[in-house]
Image: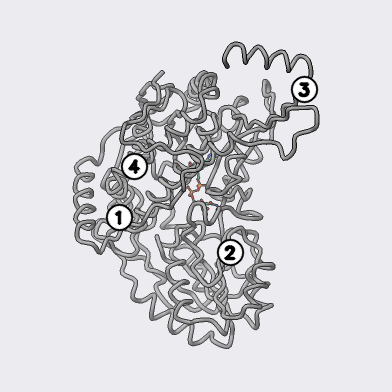
Amino acid sequence: MATVTLSTSTPVRTAQTPFANEKFVDFTAAENKRAMQAALAEVEINLGHEYDLVIGGRHLRTTDKIVSVNPARPAEVIGIHQKADAGHAEEAMQAAQAAFQTWSRTPVAERAALLFRAADLIRERKFEFCAWLTYEVGKNWAEADADVGETIDFLEFYGREALRLDKAATPIQFPGERNQLRYLPLGVGAVIPPWNFPFAIMAGMTSAAIVCGNTVILKPSVDAPTIAARFMSLLEEAGVPDGVVNLCVGEGPGFGSAIVAHPQTRFIAFTGSKAVGLEIHESAAKTRPGQIFIKRTILEMGGKDSIIVDGDCDLDAAIEGVTVSAFGFNGQKCSACSRVIVDESIYDIFCDRLQARVAKIATGDPVKNFYTGPVISERSYRKVLGYIEIGKGEGTVLNGGHAIETPEGGYYIAPTVIADVAPTARIALEEIFGPVLAVIKSKDFDDALAIANNTEYGLTGAIYSTSREKLDRAREEFHVGNLYLNRKCTGAMVGAHPFGGFNMSGTDSKAGGPDYLLLFTQAKSIAEKLGHASAAAEKQSELMGL
Ligand code: NAD
């Protein structure tokens, strides 16, 4: 097994080392622009390479492949990946079980040091990772940088959180006893991330799991496996022991469901759609022969997120906040605003101004840093265009409403705003996950809150208002896991905005928050009666100089 070694340049962090969010790159600065262009050119030379499965430290090739392509130019291959099948699920499980025996007993400081080292390496190669995100999933530079920055934040934050958890104590010491509380790892977990934050969510769930002493079978999305493969290789460079993270690129319904169903899978950390989350929940609840525990599921799922625009708001701020929340990364964020609920007193002016603002959005090749690029895949392209057709029958198209053709056949869709949508219309209730915004008119604030709460989801929400009373009512009555007052509903920051939703948006795990690591552990309470035996043991320890 490889050992975790820290380079001399790695600053030592403790639980007390202050955490600060990674600063965003200013791409208007000439040196940063140049650095990003250089990274894009460098990555372009490296497109189309073949990547291995990594199981127990062994690099494997398979006959069947998964090919990742650039959504802006589908003929351009980003990476060729091995396709794991059910047989690999068993192999990966045995490798992860074997590694668990030692990794679970590795000191927390050493496990945290692995995360800190990985954070340092990513920081050094920030532009390179940004470039991979731009090519593989179509992020513009700032969106790519936010994804890379969040990855570093998760590594830095969970490293510190693990050190803090290691110092946990019982709230009281019972008289005559020594009481201890220890947070132990669970075992082998399946980590199943989505493609839309292919670095931050993938690395965040993986690092949270391993820093607690668990070992992992990582099954990335087939739409973004190259980012995961490059992270795996960075972890190897940082010294991850064999079998602690096993990279298995595979299809969801094949490999994914096999690993969820495996009787030795102790937990599943999943982020993705409601449909797949519920399927995993159901499968994990079934006890299989040989299974000796109840599987734990950490499920973060879809959203249908609203922004309420009150009659007395700062209209400029609301127009800007709604636009970036709805169309940043093409609305392909679980937190994206897909419905804006506007007070009737300002409805017409809001629609006019929103239409003018959205018309200014430039769409084009993410490599050239257009504000919006293509949607992720042909499947997504067809789904979103299907919803736009439904929307045309449910409201009035203010912007877009069509695909944008390019010679390279990229999956471009014009930013689309559909007004006069009823609160119960399909485009007002179903997650579209693309650049489509429904505008809904509300009669008053009570009506606005009722509309905001009328979906099965409960992930993010925002309100623009200058009324203290209405902001305070929203705190109480707007039922979402992440509520924002007078700001956009996207862009959660690790530590400041622990992230996770209510109802069909998931299990409210609050990634990037103080409770997150508890989900990857089980607490052991130990009470020792103070008496002769303890006193004798202590005496002996003292004599042995311990
Ligand atoms: P998805 O549900 O299609 O896929 C997510 C992952 O599950 C992928 O790795 C996929 O291969 C895997 N998978 C698919 N079927 C499976 C099965 N039967 N068993 C096991 N694994 C299976 O989602 P997506 O398209 O990758 O991502 C978009 C979705 O993710 C949206 O619904 C979005 O709202 C949601 N999302 C939620 C959050 C959050 O924090 N709540 C964050 C990001 C994305």
Query: Which of disc 4 and disc 1 is earlier in sequence?
Result: 1
Percent position of residue 157, x then y = 48, 44
Pick whichever, 511 or 540, lies toward us: 540
Label 4: how many Cα within 10 Å (few below 14, some 14–19, many 20+):
some
Q: Position of residue 392 (x, y in %)?
A: 49, 73
Kindly identify the amino acid type of the residue bearing the numbered disc 4. Answer: Ile
Per the image, label 2 sits on a secondary structure element best described as strand
94 and 407: which one is in front?
94
Q: CA distance from mark 1 to mark 2?
A: 33 Å
Of residues 427 and 176, the one nearer the viewer is 176
Q: Earlier in the sequence, mark 1 or mark 2?
A: 1
The circle on residue 483 is: 2
Can you tell me whether the CB of the residue at mark 3 lies under 8 Å from the nearest atom of ligand 1? no
Give the residue number, with chain letter if any, for mark 3: 530
Q: Which quarter of the figure is the C terminus placed in? A: top right
Task: Say what secondary structure mark 1 lies in.
Answer: loop
Q: Amino acid at mark 1?
A: Ala
Q: Which is nearer the eye, 54 or 517? A: 517
Q: Identify the residue at horizontal 51%, vertical 66% (top origin).
A: 338
